[in-house]
Image (cartoon, rainbow, N blue to C red):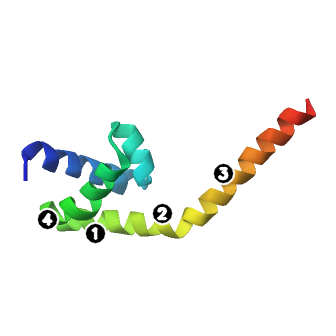
Amino acid sequence: MWEYIEKRARTNAEYIADTGCTVRACSAHFNVSKSTVHKDVTERIKFIDRELWERVQTVLGCNLKERHLRGGSATRRKYEKMRSGAEK
């Protein structure tokens, strides 16, 4: 594996493991595509650092379980914002 890809994968994985953020948030933070981050933290890091991969999998599993709740709260905020704008 090329050195810059290995370094990027490790950086992305450490960021997700340390902050508990989503793949989307990590991609926005490092200004790379979601597909790149996902491939880095699910496939590439497994061969680079197995322990880090396991920590990232724990975070991604938690994010997957909470995904439906985040979507619901985002929708709720959207309509509350629309409602408060219409009342003015």
Residue at the spot 13% in from the left edge and 65% down from the top edge: 47
Question: Who is closer to the viewer here, 16 or 18?
Answer: 16
Q: Is residue 18 above or below residue 55?
A: above
Residue to which mark 2 is pinned:
63
Residue at the spot 25% in from the left edge and 55% down from the top edge: 40
Q: Secondary structure at mark 2?
A: helix
Residue to which mark 1 is pinned:
54
The x and y percentages for residue 2 are 7, 48
Q: Amino acid at mark 2?
A: Asn
For the residues bearing labels 4 and 1, Cβ distance under 8 angstroms:
no
Of labels 3 and 2, the one closer to you: 3
Q: Is residue 42 above or below residue 32?
A: below
Along the horizontal axis of the image, is 58 left or right of 80?
left
Of labels 1 and 2, the one closer to you: 2
Q: Amino acid at mark 3?
A: Ala
Along the horizontal axis of the image, is 57 left or right of 61?
left
Identify the mark nearer the N-term, 3 or 2.
2
